[in-house]
Image: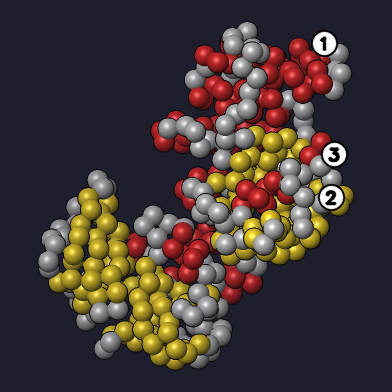
Amino acid sequence: MAQIRIEKVRKDFGGFTAVRSSSFTVEDGEFFMLLGPSGCGKTTTLRMMAGLDLPTSGQIYIDGEEVGQKRARQRDIAFVFQMFALYPHMSVEGNIAYPLRSQGMPRREIRETVAEVARILGIADILTKPVGGLSGGDRQRVALGRAIVRKPKAFFMDEPLGALDAEFREHMAEELRALHDRMGATTVYVTHDQLEAMQMGDKIVVMNHGEVEQFGVPQDIYDWPATMFVAGFIGSPPMNFLSYEGTAPPGTTEVALGHSRFGIPELREGCSGELALGVRPEHVRLDDASDYRARVVAVEYLGTTQIVTLRTGHGDIKARVLGDTLVREGETTGLSLDARTLTLFDRKSGRALRSAASERVLAHG
C-alpha cells in the first residue's frame, strides 16, 4: 500500500474552477474520506488522484512518485464506482477474475486468488452465478472483489454504497470498514453523507466550492469545526449559531448575550463586528435557574432523546435532551451552555476564532 499526497492541486473546466489549490496527505493504510455537498469538488479531486482526470496544476504523489500527469493504468490503483460497472454477460467469478486475465496471470493462480477474495467477501457460494440476478449488496461485493483481487497500491471509491437502501447501506458500511481493517489498504472514499464519513473514516477532508474547509480526524472536526460551513454540515442536528455584535479581543473568556454572560474557552485571537457563538445541540441544557430565557417552539420525540427547538433573542437553536424530559411547546425555559465546548465565529469570513481548546486542531485544519 502507499501514502498519497496532493499539493496545491487545481482543476479548471474552461472558465469553471472545480478544485482550487487543494493540499492534504493520505497516510499509508488510512481509510480517508472526501466529504462535502454535491458540486463541492470531491469527486473531481478523487478522479485526479486516480488518474481519470489530469490536474490543471499541482502535484500528486503515490508512494513517493509524482503521478499527476499519468493516467490511471500507470498508477497501480483500483477504482470502485457507485454504479458497480460489472460485466452482465459474465459470472461472479468471471467479473472478479477479469483484471487478472488481462494481466496474463496463469489460470491456476487466478482460481486460487479469486477463491481467496471470494472467501474474504463472503461470496464463495455464488461464484458461478450471473451477476444480473444478484442483489445490490452482492453486486457491490463483486465490484469490491474485482478491485481488491489485483492488490493495488490504493483503492479509490466514489460513493460505492449510494445505490443501496438506507438499512443495507449501513450494514455494508460496517462490512467495508471491517474489510479495510483486515487488508490494511490505503483507501480514499467519496461521500456526501456526513454520518457515513464519521462512521468509517480515519481522516476526513471537508470540501466546499472546490476548496478544503477542514482536514482532520472525525472527532476533532466535530468538536472544533474550522468554519461555519463545517459546523453546519457536520452533525445531526448541526451546530447552532447565536448571533450578536461586539468585540472579542485575545484573552476573552466569556461573551454577553443580552444581560446574560457565558464562559468560553480562552481566545487566542480577537475579532470585532458581527459574531456567532456556536454550540452543539447536546451541549444546550434546559435550566430554569438560568436567566437566559427561550421559548419552546417545537419538540421532536426520537425515543431515547428529544430535539427541542427554542427561540431566543439571538436566533433559534436546537437542544438534544433525554426522551423522558417534560417539555411543552409554548413554555418558557432557561438555557445553560457548556462553556468547554463553545466556538466563536467571525460571521464575515465564516472562520472559527482560535481558542485555548481548539488551537491544536485548527492549526492542522
Q: Which residue is mark 2?
A: 69
Q: Quadrant of residue 85?
A: top right
Q: Which residue is mark 3?
A: 74
Nearest the viewer among 32 and 18 is 18
Going from the N terminus, do you reach mark 2 or mark 1 first? 2
The answer to whether residue 264 is visible is no
Question: Disc 2 versus disc 1: distance between alpha carbons?
Answer: 34 Å
Q: Secondary structure at mark 3?
A: helix
Residue 334 picture location, percent across and down: 21, 74
Residue 160 picture location, percent across and down: 57, 36
User: Which mark, residue 306?
Assistant: none
Q: Which residue is mark 1?
A: 107
- Position of residue 170 relative to residue 13, above or below, is above
Residue 93 picture location, percent across and down: 67, 14
Task: Answer whether labels 1 and 3 touch (C-beta < 8 Å).
Answer: no
| Left or right: 177, with 257 as reference point | right
For the point 29% across and 74% down, the residue is 315
Q: Secondary structure at mark 1?
A: helix
Nearest the viewer among 170 and 142 is 142
Residue 9 picture location, percent across and down: 74, 60
Task: Answer whether labels 2 and 3 touch (C-beta < 8 Å).
Answer: no
Q: In the image, what residue type sits under mark 3?
A: Gln
Nearest the viewer among 58 and 168 is 58
From the viewer's perspective, is the residue at label 2 or at label 3 nearer?
2
Q: Quadrant of residue 72?
A: top right
